[in-house]
Image (spheres, rainbow, N blue to C red):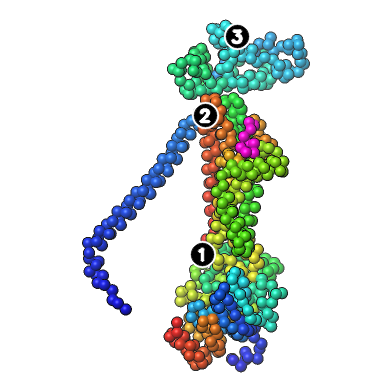
Amino acid sequence: MTMATVQTPPKISAQGVNVFYGDTHAVDNVSLDLYQDEVTALIGPSGCGKSTFLRCLNRMNDTIADCRVSGQILLDDEDIYASQIDVVQLRARVGMVFQKPNPFPKSIYDNVAYGPRIHGLADTREDLDEIVAVSLEKAGLWDEVKDRLDHLGTTLSGGQQQRLCIARAIAIDPEVILMDEPCSALDPIATAKVEALIEELKGGYAIILVTHSMQQAARISQKTAFFHLGQLIEFGDTTQIFTSPTSGRTRDYITGRLV
Amino acid sequence: MTSLPNLKKRWGRPQVQRRLRRRYIYERIFRMLGLAAIGVAGLALATLIVSVGKNAFGGFVQTSIDVDIYLNPEDLRPSSARYRHDFAERVESADMRKLLADALERQFPDIDTDSERRRALQLFSLQARRTLRDYITATPEKIGQTVRMRLLASDDVDQVVKGNIDPRVPESDRRVKDKELAWLAALRADGRISRQLSTTFFTGGDSREPEIAGIFGAIIGSVLTLLVTLLTAFPIGTLAAIYLEEFSPQNRLTAFIEVNINNLAAVPSIVFGLLGLSLFLSILELPRSSPLVGGLTLALMTLPTIIIASRASLRAVPQGLRTAAQGLGASPMQVVFHHVVPSAMPGILTGTIIGLSRGLGETAPLLMIGMVAFVVSTPNALTDAATVLPVQIFLWADSPERAFVEKTSAAILVLLGFLLAVNALAVWLRQRFEVHIPD
């Protein structure tokens, strides 16, 4: 599996990325390659910079006033921090699912249809219906909601809401999906469903998943990156990271001794 | 690490029990204070409603007198000096006072001097002659007959009938003299005095005569004025709030603007009147006393309220909603107008309506721009001279006639009704636009 991915160029290539919040150095010189059709897990203790790094990949950090980013992040060999890049278009290519399910206070249908609508991806009403249906189906939610598409998205259960958010993200057919601890607000059953969904989705997208759950990283990711104090300590195949980490800190963290 | 002192033993101490009892007592005292506060507020409200309502009832009804009038053809003949072919004009020039006075003389045979004739005529409102004239114009076939007509009494008679004039007061201190009281007693004994709901009060404009003064002109003035306020203050206020909250950089300038907006909300309303006076009347030379200028002046006053309320409700929109939309590639404007503003709408509307209802009850700034004028006609355009309900109340409260006390109360009741309606609208809009957003 490793051999197969090495020959294709990386989908996203981060080179020497530094992030500062005011005087705080949140991400310290991180270089990382992320591949299509793979799930990459970012793990590390709270405040280690993994979420901050994730948010650099679709420039969500731009909205934070005193946040500065340096270094290079290439999406298909194009620097996403270059001045000619349209952030709005970038975010359409790099979708995001957040820690807390955040459906719009609109109907289930409108939640999923929102992205295609604002980007003009659907030509007809039937077209849009199909995009919504397929997205919900891919997110494993169709059977649960097909009879109540006009209900408010916010009336669904937490796990359903998170899958709705995933459906909303994939409805605009992004190339990369960033997931920032998508299961941390969910119960174990909902978590299992979302995990199964991520596994199904990995073909066709590059998925980058920030998680606090070692088991989750081990179960569904192919690559794992371990962050500590803003630095990338170790990055490699998940099996290798979890069975024979090269860094002592990585070993300490995954065995629960480093906090 | 040191070990805890023996807390088990301390739990058993009597102080613990005493403390607990004291806490319960404080709790009870606090609840009673709360109830007392609500009681005082309720009492104040009840007093207002009772005192206004008691007087207001009289303001809605008006006294009339039934009188038998002989439509004397002699009196309706064209006078030689002003010969008119046209019947309507002939009636117009005829002396209605004479018809009425003759009728009164038949009613009260004790009238024999001119001054008594005049005093008897003063039992009736000026409106009575108009009613009589209109009747003759409409039914000329009745000329030569005696008809019983119900004519509007003067405000003084009205007050006597309503018991607001004490007959025990010495005659010289009374607007209604003994003679008139005797006439009224006779009319009453004859069953000729009656009280009706005054439609004029709801359909007429202002008048110097309390019995024919109405609030319709003021209501229309208020509606037009508030319309101007709404149409200017709402878009400007919400756009300012949206820009300040969602787009503007956070720097010293925006902080300065924010402080100033907050201060403006506390500026006395009369100052906005002065601003309106110098800006709209002196510089822009817009028509004085008009709903246009009144509305713009109230808009100045309402703007800070709307901006502050809108900003607060925009700020209360969970950040997750913005990031969700941004994450899908929505542009900043799409984020704001598709998601943030709709979610903040209930709060924005509530703030706007609070501002408007303050404007509805405002008098002081309107005095400064000349809306205090005595306006009889109902305004037809935004640039017509007009008055508004609170100013009308102010003017009537200032009038010497006893009957205006009732009119004032009645108008206050109508104003309170409008305020209630506006606030009910706010509640309805709030529920209509309310969406549940998980935060």
> What secondary structure prevails in the magenta region?
loop
Secondary structure at numbered mark 1: loop
Q: Residues within 10 Å of mark 3 (few under 14, many from 20)?
A: few
Name the amino acid, label 1: Pro
User: What distance separates the C-alpha of mark 1 from that of mark 2?
Assistant: 54 Å
The percent coordinates of residue B175 (x first, y second) are 52, 18
**Numbered circle sitting on residue B11:** none
> In the rendered structure, does residue A46 fall within the stretch colored magenta?
no
Query: In which quarter of the view is residue B131 placed?
Result: top right
Mark 2 residue element: helix
Rendered-image quadrant of the N terminus of chain A = bottom right
Count residues near mark 1 (Cα–Cα under 10 Å), then give few for <14, some for 14-19, many for 20+. Answer: some
According to the picture, the residue beneath numbered tag 1 turns out to be B438
Q: Is residue A11 visible?
A: yes
- What residue is disc 3 on? B114
Distance between mark 2 and mark 3 Cα atoms: 32 Å
Tag 3: amino acid = Asp
Can residue B224 be seen? no
Q: Which residue bears the numbered disc 2?
A: B405
Amino acid at circle 2: Val
Q: Residues within 10 Å of mark 2 (few under 14, many from 20)?
A: many
Q: Chain of mark 3?
A: B
Residue B62 at x, y = what percent?
54, 25
Tag 1–tag 2 contact (CB < 8 Å): no
**x%, y% of residue B277?**
66, 41
Q: Is label 3 in a helix, a strand or a loop?
A: helix
Q: Which residues are magenta?
A: B367-375
